[in-house]
Amino acid sequence: MYRLTNRLRPNYIREDFVVAVIGCGGTGGFVAEGLCRLLPEDMVVLLVDHDRVEQHNLVRQNFYPSELEQFKSQALARRLSERFRRRIAYITTPISTLQELPELVIGCVDNGLARRDIAERIAEKSNPPYSVYRGWWVDAGNGSNFGQVLVGNCPASQIRKSFESEHEICYALPLPTEQRPELLLQLPPAPACAEAVALDEQSPVINQGMASLVLQVVYRILVGNCPWMQLNLDMEAGTLAPVLATPENVARMTGINIRSLIFTEKKERR
């Protein structure tokens, strides 16, 4: 069974290793708290969100009445850094303003425009034939009682020789927005209906369920035994359906010849 590489950079657990959470609302707020428990204390958590905490967010997001009107990223950073005594950075501007892209990006946004920004930043780091973004983008999205976690790091057009068969390691997967192109069509929720969506249309626990799946994926990437490129949750049916990171699945998804996806080099790729 192939597993996703955790060679984000040499000696990946180090003082300046950064894990970024893009979008700190429904799922992102719970992911941020989970990362504080999961990650070694010398790893930096970066929170990115320019939205402010509103009254209706208190129903299903990880915020409290005392944090109303604060930036979501700021409120979480202050509370979690104090609680867990660890370094938590935050910005209140889009990911496009970051000078350096973190090694591990966790996208918890709710619209296609924000996902497009993430995809464009990662694509900038990918140059054929083998110079792919050395980290991973873990993208989470959900509806009322269902959701998905997708993992990728490279435009499909640039994926070649991404599966090392000798040790069954996967180095590159299509971007989440290419695995599920319909995600790019999602429009930002209109402010007028945001409260109705929060109260009536979404389960109050769906985001906590999605956060648990995200944290499981992140944990298994870091320890080096994550086999998935997708996890699909349906809380109505009570099912969790994985899609394994295999050459066959990538070939079927992208139309790339499976032979061009596999290599058998024993020496470390550069």
Image (tube, rainbow, N blue to C red):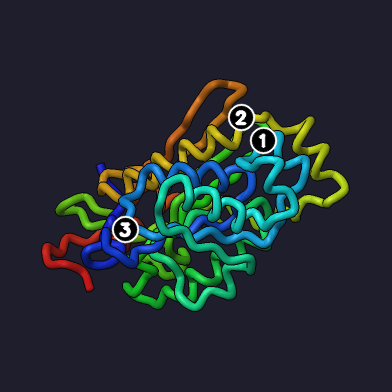
- Quadrant for the C terminus in the image: bottom left
Residue designated by label 3: 42
Q: Earlier in the sequence, mark 3 or mark 2?
A: 3
Instruction: Tell me which amino acid carries mark 1.
Output: Arg
Q: Do the residues labelled 1 and 2 touch (CB within 8 Å)?
A: yes
- Which residue occupies 45% across, 75% down? 100
Residue closest to the eye, 248 or 209: 209
Checking the image for residue 60, the label placed there is 1
On the rendered image, what quadrant is the N terminus found in?
A: top left
Three-letter amino acid code at disc 3? Asp
> In the rendered structure, which disc, 1 or 2, sits on the residue that comes first in sequence?
1
Q: In this view, does 66 lie to the left or right of 133?
A: right
Q: Do the residues labelled 3 and 2 touch (CB within 8 Å)?
A: no
Whole-number angstrom distance, CA of label 3 to CA of label 2: 31 Å
From what the image shows, is residue 49 above or below residue 246?
Answer: below
- Depth check, front residue: 131 or 11: 11
Quarter residue 111 falls in: bottom right
Label 2 Cα crowd, 10 Å radius (few <14 / some 14-19 / many 20+): some
Q: Would residue 230 be visible to someone looking at this image?
A: no
